[in-house]
Amino acid sequence: MYRSLIVSLLLTTAATAQTAPDLNTRVNRIEKELRAVQRKVFPNGQPLEPEIVAPAPAPTPIAPTTSPIADLTARVDALEGQIRALTGQTEQNGFKLRQLEEQVKRLTDEAAARAAAPAPASAAEPTPVAAEPAASGGIERPSTGDAAEDGYVYGFRLWQAKQYAEAETELKRVADKYPNHRRASFAQNLLGRAYLDEGKPALAAVALYDSYKKWPQGERAGESLYWLGQALTRLEKPADACKVYAQFGDDYEATAAASLKAQVAAGRKQAKCA
């Protein structure tokens, strides 16, 4: 009888010793997966840490309430739950982005169809486009040595003067020619606003979506989503506008200026978002 008891204890100890390394391996693997998912969901923010609290000690000193194996099991369960939550958030963000891409593709097709309509013939010869366009309509072009900055400021002045066609040409040139300059985000956003002010909401929607998609960390990315919502509202697509405002909430609500958040709130009310 004593021999059987000893053999049983030895087998139990061996199984426990084998389970602990297995669980440690699972924990290490899951922690690596969690960090990878966090980097995908929060590329520029603070990652979420799993809320794992060590079990409180038992009030009586008779025996511990949990074993090392139970503690490891709790860690594994918590980490797996955290990964499921983050993976779900990643899939949801991807779905929203695909919806926006589909909406903008429809708008792009509509804008292309309108642009394909034949324009009235003109007897005048077209003027060759210079590499750096000359000043237009008395608007002064700055010359500071920073071509992207000068181009944006010039486009801004043209927009202020309501010379929308000239402003659009200049702003598009800046965004296309200097995509890595901080003013690229400004220029693309203002290009969309110029189209909107000129009464071309379909072209505005395409330009503003490009501003958000190409420069998501740009200084005008959040503002571009607001104006994209405005363009969609003018196109009588309030449901799409509400999706854009929701995307703003996901991406920029925490860091946006109070004035921009107030504009988005007014836009949501205008579109009758839920």
Image (tube, helix red, strand yellow):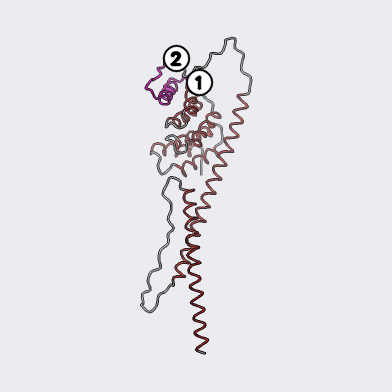
At x 59%, y 35%, the residue is 105
The amino acid marked with disc number 1 is Ala
Q: Is residue 207 left or right of residue 256?
A: right
Q: Position of residue 103 (x, y in %)?
A: 58, 37
User: Residue 37 magenta-drawn?
Assistant: no
Q: Position of residue 55 (x, y in %)?
A: 40, 68
Instruction: Estimate the x, y position of residue 238 in percent, counting from the top left.
Output: 54, 37
Residue 271 located left or right of residue 256: right
Q: Tag 2 or tag 1, which sits nearer the N-term?
A: 2
Q: Which mark is residue 137?
A: 2
| SS category of the residue bearing label 2 | loop
As rendered, which of 255 and 40 lies closer to the eye?
Answer: 40
Q: Which residue is mark 1?
A: 165
Location of residue 89 with respect to 235 vertically, above or below: below
| Magenta part of the chain | 137-165
For the residue pair 243 and 215, the one nearer the viewer reads as: 215
Identify the image quadrant of residue 124: top right
Residue 110 image-quadrant placement = top right
